[in-house]
Structures are given as C-alpha cells and as structure tokens.
Image: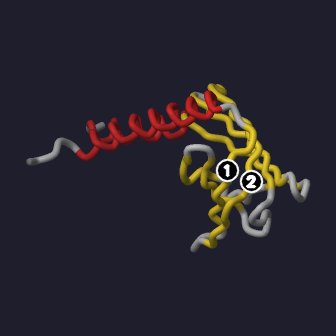
Amino acid sequence: MTSEDDVAKKIAEYCKSFEIKVDVKNITSSRNIIPKQESPISISEFLEKGMVLYLPPLTCSQGHQLMLDIELHEANEKILAFNSTAKILSIESTDSDLIRVSVKFAQFDPFIWKKLQRIYSESQEKLQVLLGSLKGPKNG
C-alpha cells in the first residue's frame, strides 16, 4: 500500500468518524422535517447568530419558526448537543432537490454555539491537513 493509499484511507476513516446530525421541526406548522435518504438535511454555513441549512422543499416558509437539534458525533459518540429555536429569514431554490434556508436563532446558548463552531472548524482543518498530505508538498 502506498503512502497515498494510507492517506486516502485516513481521510475516509476520519469522514466516517465525524458526523453532524441535524433534526428540524417546523414549530409554525407543527411538523417534523423528514429528509429523503438521498438528500439529508445539512448545514451550509455558520453565521454569528444563525446558520444556513439545506432542507427538503415545501417544508417551511419565510417567517416560520423552527426547532433545531444538532448533535456532533465522533467515533459514534455524542460529543456535543446544540438546541435552538430559529426564525426563517430567507429561502432560496437550488439546482438540487433541496432549498437553501437562512435562519436566525431566537433562543440558544451562545457558549454551546461557539463551541460547536470551534469543533467543526477544527475538524475541517484536520481534513484539510489530510487532503494536503494527499496532494504532496507544493513546488514553489
């Protein structure tokens, strides 16, 4: 096995070991938002006091209130749970079968929110290092 194979294996193992679970309930319509298997709910961006999510279409409207339950798991162990109510600020169509939803938190723990952002950022940095080692040293 080459060192490239080793790095690719480490990347695959790391991606499997770090998981973000996002559950969303539309409080306004009293419905859980159930994702399709091929189109899971995902986080696109972190904002100072909110986030941008990808959700199934026809599940919410601008101005609706959502309940967000987010868990970070590493090696199948929950390492952080974040809960918030949020108001939908905007909804955009996408090329996929999801909508892009911007929300602002109404009730949330800012300490847990910052911790979630930090852990996620650290995981992305670790992934970038692994990807960088797959590409090899830069010539310059």
Q: Secondary structure at mark 2?
A: strand
Residue at figure coordinates x 51%, y 37% from the top left: 120
Which of the marked residues, 1 or 2, is nearer the chain's N terminus? 2
Quadrant of residue 74 in the image? Answer: top right
Q: CA distance from mark 1 to mark 2?
A: 5 Å
Can residue 125 be seen from the camera position used here? yes
Residue at figure coordinates x 66%, y 66% from the top left: 99
Horizontal side, residue 114 vs residue 61: left or right: left
Badge 2: residue crowd in 10 Å (few <14, some 14–19, many ≥20): many
Q: Could you say where residue 1 lies in the image, as x and y percent from the top left?
A: 30, 37
Q: Which residue is mark 1?
A: 104
Q: Secondary structure at mark 1?
A: strand
Give the amino acid type for the residue marked by disc 2 in the picture: Lys
Q: Nearer the viewer, residue 35 or 50?
A: 50
Quadrant of residue 91 in the image? Answer: bottom right
Q: Could you say where residue 76 lies in the image, as x and y percent from the top left?
A: 63, 29
Residues at marks 1 and 2 touching, judged by CB atoms closer than 8 Å? yes
Horizontal side, residue 125 vs residue 94: left or right: left
Color theme of the render = secondary structure
Q: Could you say where residue 130 lies in the image, as x and y percent from the top left?
A: 34, 38
Residue at figure coordinates x 54%, y 38% from the top left: 16
Q: Which residue is mark 2?
A: 87
Badge 1: residue crowd in 10 Å (few <14, some 14–19, many ≥20): many
From the viewer's perspective, is residue 22 above or below residue 115? below
Residue at figure coordinates x 46%, y 35% from the top left: 123
Give the amino acid type for the residue marked by disc 1 in the picture: Lys
Q: Nearer the viewer, residue 84 or 80?
A: 84
Q: Nearer the viewer, residue 1 or 94?
A: 94
Horizontal side, residue 83 vs residue 14: left or right: right
Q: Could you say where residue 31 lies in the image, as x and y percent from the top left?
A: 88, 55
